[in-house]
Image (cartoon, coloured by chain):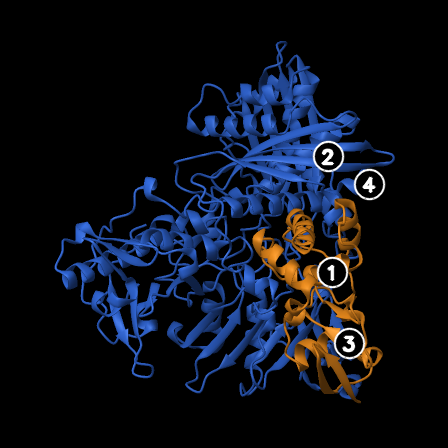
Chain colours: A orange, B blue
Amino acid sequence: MSLSLKLNGKIHEIEAEPGTPLLWVIRDELKLTGTKFGCGVASCGACTVHVDGEPTRSCQTYIEDVQDAEITTIEMIEEDKIGSAVQQAWIELDVVQCGYCQSGQIMSAVGLLRENEKPTADEIDDYMYGNACRCAAYQRIRAAVQRASDILEA
Amino acid sequence: MTLDLSRRGFLKSAATVSVMLYVGVTADGAKAASGASDAMLNPFVKIDADGNVIAIIKHVEMGQGTATGLATLIAEELGVTMDQIGFDFAPSNPQVYNNLFFGPFQGTGGSTAMANSWMQYRAAGANARDILIKAAAASWDVDAASLDIQNGQIVGSGRTAPIGEFVAAAGAFSPSDTPPLRDPSEWKIIGNAATRRKDSPGKVNGRAMFAMDLHLPNQMVVMIKRTPQRGGTVASFDASAAQDVKGFIMAQTLPTQHGVAIYAENTWAAMQARSAIEIEWDFSAAEVRSSKEIKDEIMTALDTSPTYNVNKADRDAVAAVVDNAHTVVEKTFYFPLLAHAPMEPLNCTIEQTAEGDIVLHDGAQSPTGPHMAYQQIFGLPAEKIHIKTMLAGGSFGRRTTPDADYQVEAGLAFIMTDRSRPVKLVWDREDDIRGGYYRPAVGHKVRVGLDAQGSIVGWDHRVAGQSIIKGTAFEPMMVRDGVDHSSVEGLADSPYIIPGMAVGLTDTQKATSVLWWRSVGHTHTAYAMEVMMDMAARATGQDPVAFRLSYLSGGGQDQQRKAAVLKLAAEKGNWGKPAAGNMQGVAVHKSFGSYVAEVVEISGNLEDGVKIEKITAAVDCGIAVNPDIIKAQIEGAVGYGIGHVMRDQITLDGGSVEQSNFPDYEPLRISDIKSIDTHIVASAEAPTGIGEPGTPPSAPALANAIAGLQLVVAELPMSENGVTFA
């Protein structure tokens, strides 16, 4: 089927079968590879994008369900004030190791800070629970979310 | 460690009229001439006329920080800042870019990247500095000894100029065969905790290119439907249902018969087509055993006299000493199969050039593996095969197997086509969890005898499990007197001075494909040994830290370094003074040349759940090149070790793996460990490993904390053996 997708502020005309996960349209058709494939069953968070501002697992989001939505990927998140602060904090604290999960971590962290400007460690743990990092960079993820919060407050 | 880095040359590119200075080696060892190409010169350092420096990284960057680490060495010696240096990955060339500890083999493993490169990369940077200074000295007609390079500027004799000005002239100067290394007192970047990772920006803005992110024009995506039981083969298959999948191209049985390759226009089409294809399997020669039978074989072996006497001990005498000891503590341990599960599923892309060369794009740990395999598959000489290293989204040992498993799959899938379209092989998470290879299932039976004063008098230690190395191409090099050292490493060769120790080993039958998994044999040897040390201390009413220190006194540097990290972790971790209601456990272990001690503090109880409140680590890995990366590696290695012992195992049922994805092979989550605090011991020793050594002590330290709740967990994972985690 033909459909148009509003992604990163542009309209993209897409040819895709119903039931195609948004992840594969983003990666294979639009060639935006910052959004990662990790598990395919929404249990690792590597594929997290924003759908109307909400962190969403794109591997379990079907393309026909997001035709009218505004989709944002990691490639555009620096345009967002919170996104930019989160990226700055990630670099300051050298959060990344292999880095493969970090697009998803950052997209989730932005979602958290949008709804909670000053999250506690426990609140961060609750919100970020579904974003797996096999390098176990969690301690820095937690610290960087708090650092981003401080950057935004300043 | 004698690679000659003194060859040099410079290139004037006709296309861009840019001038580059290369410091490297030619394949035949000859002096590089003006006009030599990048590929001919095999550089470790490249500098352009604007003074931009590129460090050529011979190891894969899989998160451990090697790209930053090796760039640090060059920047320090050359005299540029970390902002003035970038990195590229080296091409596959086992003569030039080999791991100096591995012989003519280019590979990343055994936590050796910094250790083997330490002098080599410093020498490369020093050579670049040396010839740039000679060029400047000639130009300015001053003594070279009066000049230095600082922050990318040649300075001295009252003058300053950017290094780029001398890039062209430097090619005419012969560098010294013994390049002048900077004195440690001059170091600005080595040891500087403020140094940031070079790969950070691209990994936070989504632009870093992992192998999975490559899209070559006109590529096909291949996924493979593999036999669920090792040794099964394809009898026949029916792809008719796949014809309805838009983007499906074709399906063919691999020459190895272990699966059917499905070719499609994109990943989603490949996944759907694979689901639609029906395969009739021939399981007549397939593995049919279940985990219980594998475990039974291991347990039986532990009750039988071991095949190999690892440390040539008088085993009967040791057994007699233990039997007659005042106090005997004994325990039998069982460690299950574990998957590596790197975040980026396995993948690679293969293409053929117009000249008939084969190019593989891969995040391989060991480019030499597929490089050799492809010479056989394609019948081409080494120089017609090119392995392009890309970022790897984790590995933990998985991206290097003795038979180059996934790269061979890609090669076979490609050779069955007309080679006009590149082939990208993609594994999904189910392939990863079910497709082997695993940390072997291993058992330990340990009996420790102590005298009336609470001193160890005998330590009878048996290990049984499937060998990682036997039956592979590495066996002739790595198995000695029948002993696969990776099955027993860290026991008899531990720095502890333990009287009357006997270590025996029995290999069990091949049950599945097994592989090195972050810290290899130390994953189980450290657990068995450190849990036994605690049991022995507790049984005789002694403090676990003081007890361990008594077996590290009176020795040499090996013992002193191990004792020092133990003392530091105990001090920083408030050993003996946990928060009210909390329990502590400690473990210390040497692996890959480095010493790590960890104190784990937990709250809660076995019924309502145990919570890991705090982990305090101390590490001595020699000179701390990038202290912040070292801390990150300890944090990650601790999490990797803890996460798996908490709740992970791979089990077989009738030869098939029962787990399939993260819901039943649950990764460590952010809430599992509240904090990790790492302390680095200052050292002037050459750097040793850091990617793996944080893992071995983590699990036994947790077990020893839980032992305070009156449960010694001897079989893993803990969640299946009496421990609930909050």
Residue furthest to the top: B452
Name the element at disc 1.
helix
Question: Residue A94: horizontal and vertical position, in percent?
Answer: 57, 53
Q: If you read the primary sequence from the N terminus, does the residue marked by circle 4 or circle 2 appear first?
A: 2
- Amino acid beneath label 4: Ala
Disc 3 target residue? A70
Disc 1 target residue? A108
Disc 2 target residue? B714
Disc 2 + disc 3, Cβ < 8 Å:
no
Position of residue B87 in the picture relative to residue A114 (left or right) = left
Disc 4 target residue? B726
For the residue carrying disc 2, how many other residues have a C-alpha within 10 Å: few (<14), some (14-19), or many (20+)? many
Disc 4 + disc 3, Cβ < 8 Å:
no
Question: Residue B372: horizontal and vertical position, in percent?
Answer: 45, 67
Q: Badge 3 sits on which subunit?
A: A
Disc 3 + disc 1, Cβ < 8 Å:
no
Q: Badge 1 sits on which subunit?
A: A
Question: Residue B569: horizontal and vertical position, in percent?
Answer: 58, 30
Label 1 – label 2 distance at C-alpha: 38 Å
- Amino acid beneath label 2: Ala
